[in-house]
Image: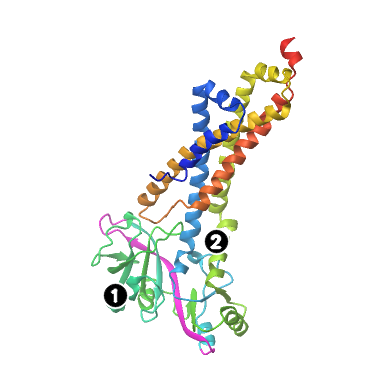
Amino acid sequence: MRVPWFGLLYLAIPLLLNVMRTPLAWFNLINERTRLLVAIAGVAFAVLLIFMNLGFLGSLLQTSTEIYNQMNADIFLVSPQTLEISTSETFPKNRLYQIAGLRGVRRVMPVYVGYMQWKNPETRRSRAVFAFAINPRDPVFLMPELKDPQTLIAMERPNVVLMDRRSRPEFGSQAVGTTTESERRQVEIVGNYSLGGGFTADGTVIMSDQNFLRFLSPRTLERIDLGLVEIAPNMNLEQMVKEIDDRLPDDVLVLTKAGIVAREQGYWLVAASLGFIFGLGVAVSFIVGTVIVYQIIYTDISDHYAEYATLKAMGYRGRYLFTVVLQEAIILALMGYVPGYLFSFGLYELTTRATSGALPMSMNLGRAIFVLILTFIMCCLSALVSVRKVMTADPAEVFS
């Protein structure tokens, strides 16, 4: 029978106690079982908060850049004023024509983006949907649905769109053949795909550039939001970026796929409030856990102050007493981490299902180990603060 990796943490507790001459730390904790359960619940709660904030932050970074991973391009052109794709600034389309003839450039493709009002066909309520517009003959996207010739032919019809399956239910039916209104025009859904809008949009659609003109007039096709460049397989990517950058003026940034992903993630982490909020949530959760563990350990020390003083009178050094308190903190960290991990795992699944995959939250080994390390630091820091009372215990004062 295989033991889950987090189950090894509980197996580690007896091993930890076995290396002690006297498992005093364990006896101190189980002496007050109610207090022990409260301490475990406090640590688990702090672990849960840290996991959830990291989960939302990871989901933010993943969904904000998933669109680039689904685009068939090696090099991206964007305006320097563009912070992230949903608030992009346009630049002249002829920048693509200026580099189309370069050796090694296989294909250039324009992409247009913008918000449009979508009316729920059942409730007749409108909400903003994020639209991508392309030339249907350009292989812009890697999603399998966008490679179907019948779907591409259907996209060329007037007033039709492809609807994201991960769009919020508030947009209404996403079934092929559904008709509704958008920007005061009738629109029909002729296909579906799976992408997700993340934190920037509740839903997305993909349409032809000609339909983009119909729905989002007075936008023109002469100014684009994103330029895609596909290069020949045998070309050096960094060298091509340099050649293209040298050819174009300063009104365009030339980035690799990794570069544009890092740029957008940097915006969400540093400039946007969401990244700051989730990062602050991790810090606050860490502080809350530290305070909870400190109160538990400090109360335990106070209740056993006479016993600690007796140990000092018997010849035990402060180092031994410090080790006992530190062991209590490590045991609490191990016992509190496991339920916190399990609850977080369940909430990750619940969040993903509740948002229809729009906010994918998945547990990974790196995050699990990172939170485990934070939990150890949190508990050990509490022990370091509270152990001063033990180190300064004076037997003469206790028994005078």
Horizontal side of 344 relative to 152 (left or right) equals right
Which residue corresponds to mark 1?
Answer: 151
Q: Give the residue drawn at x 47%, y 55%.
A: 59
Q: Is residue 173 above or below residue 92?
A: above
Q: Is residue 106 above or below residue 164?
A: below
Assess whether residue 112 is covered by the magenta stretch: yes
The magenta span reads 101-125
Q: Give the residue drawn at x 35%, y 56%.
A: 168
- Does dot 1 land on a helix, a strand or a loop? helix
Q: Residues within 10 Å of mark 1 (few under 14, many from 20)?
A: some
Front in this rendered view, residue 397 or 8: 8
Front in this rendered view, residue 217 or 112: 112
First in sequence: mark 1 vs mark 2: 1
Residue 101 spot, x, y in % from top left? 52, 90
Q: Residues within 10 Å of mark 2 (few under 14, many from 20)?
A: many
Residue 305 spot, x, y in % from top left? 66, 19
Q: Is residue 133 above or below residue 96?
A: above
Q: Which of the 4 image quadrants contains residue 149? A: bottom left
Residue 399 spot, x, y in % from top left? 72, 11
Q: Give the residue drawn at x 54%, y 48%.
A: 369
Kindly identify which numbered label has been placed on residue 265: 2
Horizontal side of 321 relative to 174 (left or right) equals right
Front in this rendered view, residue 42 or 133: 42
How many badges with numbers are in the image? Answer: 2
Front in this rendered view, residue 208 or 126: 208
